[in-house]
Image: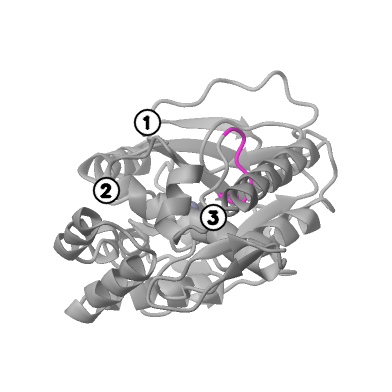
Amino acid sequence: MVDATDAAPLPPAPEPGQSLALLPGLHWVRMPLGFAPWHVNLWLIEDGDAWLAVDAGARSEETLAHWTTLQRQTLGGRPITRLLATHFHPDHVGFAGWLCERHGATLLMPRSEYLFARFLLLDTDEGMTAQQLGFARAAGCPESFLAFLAGRGPLYSRAVVSLPRSYRRIAEGDVLRIGGRDWHVLTGGGHAPEMACLHCPELKVLLSADQILPRISPYIGVGATEPEADPLRDFLESNARLKAIPPGTLILPSHGDPFHGLHARIDALAAHHAERLATLEAACATPLTAYQATRVLFPRVQEDRQIGFALGETLAHLNRLVAEGRVMKSEGAVPGYSKAG
Ligand SMILES: [Zn+2]
């Protein structure tokens, strides 16, 4: 049996828009991104006389051109009949609507991810901006950042072409039959509400989406929709569950290169966040607003676009510290965070 542990040393990543046959029936496609980490990995799984695609790429002229080439070359005239979107982020579903329409494909997606994507596509009026501004004000953000937010408008609906108005739900525990093999659906929280990962025990492969990445830590953030969310707890708990996957499994992430060593990577991510929590807890010996705490965790971040991410990630750590009783949050228009005890 050919599987990931039998494979020779892993090949280098395909060029943007090219595909690479990584394992029997499994092709790796890399699509460009206009922002760090500059690429997203998609996966094409042969499925008899058709294909199942995992994720669709970001909305851009380049991605569109690459899909057109892939259709001619790699797909060999066979249609994509199922598109599995791992989570709602635009670099994964930007072209979902286009692909599904072009191929007559069914969209497979976890329910929370589908609903969140559809909600964001529709959330485009001035109330959305007002909500963002209120969230940033309560964090104590400077006027310059508020002005940036006010002028930014809805991002999501610009980054996603469309989504089909119906879909097929996938959920933890489902087993999908693809190309004669069983692929088990696992879901994880933290980076997204219900991100789908796919495990094929026969191939000894896990498509880890953005849940487990090899070099960067996935963005774990709190946003204006759910200011008191605790995504870091979701992330750490989900990752602990992923340790049920056998250690020798080849991990195929959405960003970066395939790697072995899932369990060590999960431990490293947990240690990274434990260290960030300890740094922030110590800094709160002097009471801080959420924005001031952002400057502790991300002292080099200057660009307004980056401040939004830094604030979301900082709030994720503050909310965890508050839940653990290590930091107290004061009441008021701009709450302060102070070390407990
Ligand atoms: Zn993502």
Q: Quadrant of the N terminus?
A: top right
Span colored in magenta: 209-215
Real-space Cα separation, disc 1 to disc 3, in angstroms: 27 Å
Look at mark 1 in the image and give the residue it sits on. Answer: 16
What kind of element bears circle 3? loop
Disc number lying in front (2 or 1): 2
Question: Neighbour class for label 1 at 10 Å: few (<14), some, many (≥20)?
Answer: some
Q: Amino acid at mark 2?
A: Asp
Look at mark 2 in the image and give the residue it sits on. Answer: 304
x then y, percent, for residue 34:
29, 39
Which residue is drawn at the image coordinates 46% and 68% (left, top)? Answer: 107
Look at mark 3 in the image and give the residue it sits on. Answer: 220
Which residue is drawn at the image coordinates 43% and 38% (left, top)? Answer: 299
Real-space Cα separation, disc 2 to disc 1, in angstroms: 28 Å
Q: Is residue 231 visible?
A: no
Q: Amino acid at mark 3?
A: Ile
In this view of the protein, which residue sits in the foreground, 116 or 44?
116
Q: Amino acid at mark 1?
A: Pro
Circle nearer the N terminus (1, 3):
1
x then y, percent, for residue 174:
71, 69
What kind of element bears circle 1? loop
Q: How many marks?
A: 3
